């Protein structure tokens, strides 16, 4: 089950693969997603695929769950997904990390 057009395809420690409806067919959004998420401390690699509407994110869980990284995640999600309750989104995603 997804949240706000985001679906977890697969997750394992240090890696999460997401389907993002808004990304499908939108190369500009995929590039912006990669740029913004790559800048967050704890995210090691971001591999978007706009053709499939998917993104694979490699991360360091300990670094990503630091206070500053969590604030950066919230801010980035708010920017890229306006109108979405980012606290609910973060809580939903955290179940898969």
Image (cartoon, rainbow, N blue to C red):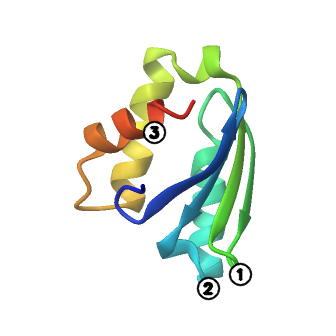
Tag 3 near tag 2, CB within 8 Å? no
Looking at the rendered image, the quarter that the C terminus falls into is top right
* Secondary structure type for disc 2: loop
For the residue pair 85 and 36, the one nearer the viewer reads as: 85
Q: Is residue 13 left or right of residue 22?
A: right
Instruction: Tell me which label, 3 or 2, sits earlier in the chain.
Output: 2
Q: Which residue is mark 1?
A: 51
Res. 4 image quadrant: bottom left
Q: Is 10 placed above or below 64 here?
A: below
Instruction: Tell me which label, 3 or 1, sits earlier in the chain.
Output: 1
Which mark, by number, is residue 93? 3
For the residue pair 6 and 47, the one nearer the viewer reads as: 6
Instruction: Tell me which label, 1 or 2, sits earlier in the chain.
Output: 2
Q: What percent of the width, then of the height, locates residue 94?
A: 46, 31
User: Which residue is at a point 45% across and 39% down the rendered structure image?
Assistant: 93
Mark 1: few/some/many CA within 10 Å (<14, 14-19, 20+):
few
Q: Is 13 placed above or below 11 here?
A: above
Mark 3: few/some/many CA within 10 Å (<14, 14-19, 20+):
some
Tag 1 near tag 2, CB within 8 Å? yes
Q: How far apart are the two marked residues, 3 and 1, measured between alpha carbons?
A: 23 Å
Q: How far apart are the two marked residues, 1 and 2, measured between alpha carbons?
A: 5 Å
As drawn, the residue found furthest toward the bottom would be: 25
User: Which residue is at a point 65% across and 27% down the rendered structure image?
Assistant: 42
Res. 53 image quadrant: bottom right
Q: What percent of the width, then of the height, locates residue 36?
A: 57, 51
User: Which residue is at a point 59% across and 82% down the rendered structure image?
Assistant: 26
* Secondary structure type for disc 3: helix
Q: Is residue 63 left or right of residue 95?
A: right
User: Which residue is at a point 65% across and 65% down the rendered structure image?
Assistant: 54
Looking at the rendered image, the quarter that the N terminus falls into is bottom left
Q: Which residue is mark 2?
A: 25
Q: How far apart are the two marked residues, 3 and 2, measured between alpha carbons?
A: 23 Å
């Amino acid at each position: 089950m997804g949240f706000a057009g985001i679906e977890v395809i697969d997750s394992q420690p240090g890696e999460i693969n997401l389907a993002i409806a808004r990304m499908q067919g939108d190369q500009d959004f995929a590039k912006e997603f990669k740029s913004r998420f790559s800048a967050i401390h704890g995210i090691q690699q971001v591999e978007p695929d706009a053709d499939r509407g998917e993104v694979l994110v490699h991360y360091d869980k300990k670094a990503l769950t630091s206070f500053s990284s969590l604030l950066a995640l919230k801010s980035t999600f708010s920017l890229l997904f306006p109108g979405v309750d980012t606290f609910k989104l973060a809580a939903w995603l955290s179940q898969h990390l």
